[in-house]
Amino acid sequence: MRKFVIMGIQGSGKGTQAAMLAERFDLVHISVGDIFRWHIQFHTKLGAAVKRIVDAGELVGDDLVESVVQERLQLHDWNYGFIVDGFPRNAVQAEFFLESYDIDGVINLEMPDSEVERRVLSRRLCSGCGLDYNLIASRPEVEDTCDVCGGTLVRRPDDNPEALANRLRDYHEKTTPVIELFERKEFVAHIDATQDRESVLAAIVDEFHLPTD
Ligand code: AMP
């Protein structure tokens, strides 16, 4: 059983690395942002409650976020473990998480702000299946079209300069202290996220001595 938290500034490849690790090691990938986006896309009550906040790049209230994470983990479908992506994002959420779950370690993807803007503003998402693209690193074969399902690629509503500024501010003010808190209690692997995705994955595998075959 492997249990990880993946942290990193917006655009650092958290979602991509979490998905790659989940596939390789049979982990359940729990992305709080994806859960919210799903609810917004399907117009659920929860979606209506969080849409404005998510679109503006602000943080959803701790109680709501904690109940979403708790309900997801309570499904107990993670026989080989899980990787939590996008949570915790502040000290309150981190205390809640550490009280409730044991983890093997934290992956911290590091990237300078200058690179973040370039990457985030070129990010696209398939409106059909949710697959991530990047117009710099992973372009679709046909412009604006998903290689897998043929869906139209769109920009996330919160991938605009104003929302990004909010998210970067929150990250530095609220999420960086979480990494410091984790460092006192857990093993934190700091990974250079400016490398290509395969090298980042290899660095994570190496830090946690995960099997390579
Ligand atoms: P992400 O895909 O991780 O960038 O998350 C997208 C958006 O979902 C964030 O900008 C927040 O509005 C919301 N969100 C995701 N995770 C959290 C969290 N742990 N705490 C508060 N809001 C969150």
Image (cartoon, helix red, strand yellow):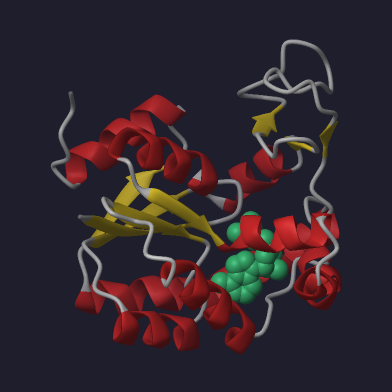
Which quadrant is home to the C terminus?
top left
Image vertical order of residue 10 relative to residue 138, above or below: below
Instruction: Name the spot of residue 34 as percent of width and height, x first.
Output: 64, 55
Image vertical order of residue 5 relative to residue 126, above or below: below
Residue in front for this viewpoint, 93 or 81: 81
Residue in front for this viewpoint, 206 or 19: 19
Which quadrant is home to the N terminus?
bottom left
Q: Residue at x 15, y 34 (%)?
A: 211
Instruction: Name the spot of residue 138 as percent of width and height, x first.
Output: 62, 22
Q: Which quadrant holds residue 143?
A: top right
Dividing the image into four quarters, tell me where ligand 1 lies.
Answer: bottom right
Residue in front for this viewpoint, 118 or 184: 184
Q: Residue at x 46, y 85 (%)?
A: 91
Q: Viewed as shown, does residue 107 lie left or right of 89?
A: left
Number of marks: 0
Q: Residue at x 44, y 40 (%)?
A: 17
Instruction: Name the spot of residue 27 as percent of width and height, x first.
Output: 35, 47
Q: Viewed as shown, does residue 72 lie left or right of 129?
A: left
Instruction: Name the spot of residue 184 as percent of width and height, x first.
Output: 22, 78
